[in-house]
């Protein structure tokens, strides 16, 4: 499950780019229902897109067994930032 522009979507990963016009989706919910979906099916739905160091813990606490992190692991120059990944791993070990 991805969160994109406030909607629950299933995005085809290979279509992700800086050009949103090229984004391909398999499914788009007509409701903004990510939290409801995670709570309805605890430990059954991974959450991705829009995940950051600030909200990762929240989604795990709400019932997502896993979170999918991508862009939040890179710095402003587009380089991978290992320290951000280490923070997420520490949180996971603490739960």
Image (cartoon, grey):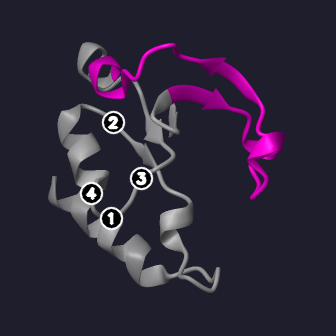
Are the residues flagged by discs 2 and 4 in contact, CB closer than 8 Å? no
x, y (%) of residue 7? Answer: 49, 28
Look at 62% across and 86% down and name the residue there.
77
Mark 3 or mark 2: which comes first in sequence?
A: 3
Instruction: Tell me the tag on residue 53.
Output: 1
Q: Relative to 15, is 10 above or below?
A: above
CA gap between label 3 and label 2 equals 14 Å
Are the residues flagged by discs 1 and 2 in contact, CB closer than 8 Å? no
| Residue at the spot of label 2 | 65
Labels 1, 4: front one: 1
Q: Relative to 36, is 23 above or below?
A: below
**SS category of the residue bearing label 3:** loop
Mark 2 or mark 4: which comes first in sequence?
A: 2
Mark 1 or mark 2: which comes first in sequence?
A: 1
Look at 52% across and 16% down and name the residue there.
29
Chain part drawn in magenta: 8-37
| Residue at the spot of label 3 | 51
CA gap between label 3 and label 4 equals 14 Å
Label 4: how many residues lie within 10 Å, few (<14), some (14-19) or many (20+)?
A: few
Label 3: how many residues lie within 10 Å, few (<14), some (14-19) or many (20+)?
A: many
x, y (%) of residue 48? Answer: 48, 43
**SS category of the residue bearing label 2:** loop
Which of the 4 image quarters holds residue 84? bottom left
Q: Relative to 1, is 15 above or below?
A: below
Label 1: how many residues lie within 10 Å, few (<14), some (14-19) or many (20+)?
A: some
| Number of marks drawn | 4
| Residue at the spot of label 4 | 92
x, y (%) of residue 4? Answer: 54, 39
Outermost residue toward the right in this view: 22
CA gap between label 3 and label 1 equals 7 Å
């Amino acid at each position: 499950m991805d969160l994109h522009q406030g909607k629950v979507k299933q995005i085809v990963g290979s279509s992700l780019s800086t050009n949103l016009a090229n984004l391909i989706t398999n499914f788009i919910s007509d409701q903004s229902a990510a939290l409801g979906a995670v709570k309805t099916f605890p430990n059954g739905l991974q959450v991705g897109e829009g995940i950051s160091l600030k909200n990762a813990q929240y989604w795990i606490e709400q019932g997502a067994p896993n979170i999918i992190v991508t862009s939040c692991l890179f710095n402003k120059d587009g380089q991978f930032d290992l320290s951000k990944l280490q923070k997420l791993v520490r949180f996971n070990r603490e739960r």
